[in-house]
Amino acid sequence: MFEESAGKFGGKVVFRTEHLYPAYNIDESEEIISILKTASEKAGIELKLGQTGGGSDTNIINSKGIKSVNISVGMDKVHSLEEQINIDDMVKATEFLISIIQSIN
């Protein structure tokens, strides 16, 4: 579509891609997920496993063979000028973190 549109106006398209970070997938049977399930139960937090489409340091860490996941802390309107987090959610995130540390064998 880019080439077609550019051609209509006498232009051309030069398209480059750059691989910024590798994708990863963590199976629910992995130890890290087991730790998170245990920690969420202890902290009284519902654990919701899911995929995002974004990238983070976690992509790089996983590419080095270290199993890791991103954990949401309850932020709202992320990456916007109205980004915010409720203090109660920050407290719960801290309690969850403590529970994760305590759940590691």
Image (cartoon, helix red, strand yellow):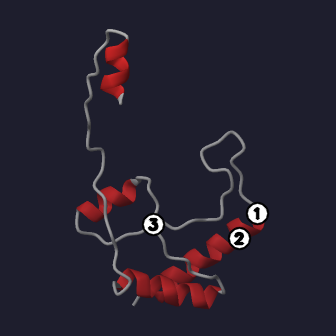
Q: Please name the residue shown 64% across and 42% down the image.
A: 80
Residue type (three-letter) at the residue carrying disc 3: Gln
The disc at residue 51 is: 3
**Label 2 environment density (alpha carbons within 10 Å; few <14, some 14–19, many ≥20):** few
Mark 1, other Cα within 10 Å: few <14 / some 14–19 / many ≥20: few
> Mark 2 is on which residue type?
Val
**Disc number at residue 87?**
1
Given residues 12 and 105, the one toward you in this image is 12
First in sequence: mark 1 vs mark 3? 3
Picture layout, residue 86 above or below residue 42: above
Q: Residue at x 71, y 70 (%)?
A: 91
- Measured in 3D between alpha carbons, the distance from the residue under mark 1 to the one under mark 2, in whole angstroms, is 6 Å
Badge 2 element? helix
Q: Position of residue 92 (x, y in %)?
A: 68, 74
Element type at mark 1: helix
Report, in whole angstroms, how far the alpha carbon at label 2 lies from the one at label 3: 24 Å
